Amino acid sequence: MPNQAHSQHSRSGARVTGAYLQPLLEIVNERGVCLQELARRAQLPGQTALTLTALPESLPAASYVRLLDAGAQLCDDPHFGLHVGERVKLGTYSVYGLILLSCRDFGQAFQQTLRYEGLAHDLGRSALQVEQQTAEYQWHSAFPEASRHLAESVFAGIRVFGDWLAGFTLPSAPVFFTHAAPDDISEHRRLFGEAVHFGATHNCARFDAALLNWPVPNAEVGMYPLLQQHAEKLLQEKLRAVSDGGIVAIVRSAIVKNLAQDQVRLISIAQELQLSQRTLQRKLSEAGFSFQQILDKTRHELACDYLRQPDLSLADIAFLLGYREQSAFNHAFKEWTGKSPGAYRDQPAVKP
């Protein structure tokens, strides 16, 4: 299954992106809770600052789980997970959310979720089973001992995002949670309908398999190849960074993530990694590299990979590599290889 690549993640290395964290922080802030008190209650590391204007690039998934519980306590909200899930937006899921928006139908969207949800979080993994006329979406938590707020936030987010993709409120579907039923399930029924069950063997939702063939209205299907290539690179970089753990791999991963947004300057990468420029330069120097060397090497390797993809134009590749003008990409590539991108692509050795 596409999901197998994610098995390489150890729970200790599990992360949650800053974008995925934002709905939680927004609701806590709106209810008048101090974000630093939230961080203290969740026992976050001292250097982790929680602000709505400068989100961390990522944080440990275990910290996010504690933030959910701390938020529920500080807001005195027994349905905190549901309310956080309701706040999801397109940006919550990072580039994986953009891919969903480019899918032709819901079946393709589910398949992309199986592959790329790890770009947003490592809180758990999805699975999809189809038997005859019934489809079952499953979510297997990486933190089975967590409170119910985790699973409920995930399913509320899926419900809201699914309605957004469809352009209307999807039909209610039976939802099953492994945790025991809370005293009040009115909020669950408001979100999911009357068929909400607790104490199940796994977290899942069942629906008519015909929904998998429903089109995604206004989908930018023409963007799918470009976004899929970008997401695949991010996924591979994440796997490499997790397995390596070294500063070079971590910086490389941050560079790849930010190339298309033209945010690959030393100062911006240092801020994302919550390091000063001087500290980052020192760490890279100790590893035998400069920031510019890593940036050039990353762009060179990605350019060669992208040129093997016939669906990507030279303008697309220049954009993915963070160049404002295709001419700048052409000039840099010729310095790296002695050939223009077009000549390199035309070589038989690089054709797929």
Image (cartoon, grey):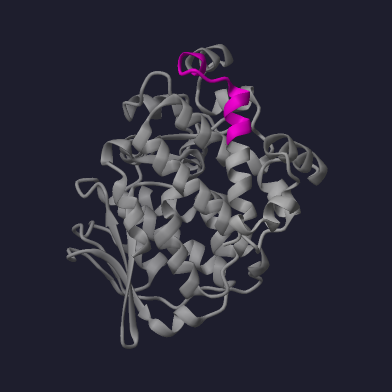
In this view, 243 is above or below 145: above
Question: Would residue 183 be visible to someone looking at this image?
Answer: yes
Dividing the image into 4 quarters, which one contains the C terminus? bottom right
State the image quarter where residue 130 is shown. Answer: bottom left
In the picture, residue 73 is in which quadrant?
top left
Is 146 colored magenta in this rendering? no
Predominant secondary structure, magenta span = helix
Q: Position of residue 269 (x, y in %)?
A: 58, 27
Q: Quadrant of residue 255?
A: top right
| Residue at the limit of the structure toward the bottom, as seen here | 132
Q: Is residue 323 left or right of residue 52?
A: right
Highlighted magenta segment, given as a residue range: 284-297
Q: Is residue 194 left or right of residue 143?
A: right
Q: Residue 291: say if magenta.
A: yes
Q: Nearer the viewer, residue 244 or 32?
A: 244
Q: Is residue 322 above or below residue 99?
A: above
Q: Position of residue 206 (x, y in %)?
A: 32, 75
Number of numbered labels in the structure image: 0
Q: What residue is shown at x 57% (from left), y 28% (from top)?
A: 294
Tell me where residue 88 appears, x and y as whole percent.
50, 53
The residue at 68%/36% (across/down) is 336
Residue lying at 63% horizontally and 24% vertically, measured from the top left:
292
128 versus 208 height, above or below: above
The answer to whether one can see residue 88 in this image is no
Eyeballing the image, is 142 above or below 187? above
**Residue 146 pos. (x, y %):** 24, 45
Quarter occupied by the N terminus: bottom left
Q: Residue at x 59, y 56 (%)?
A: 349
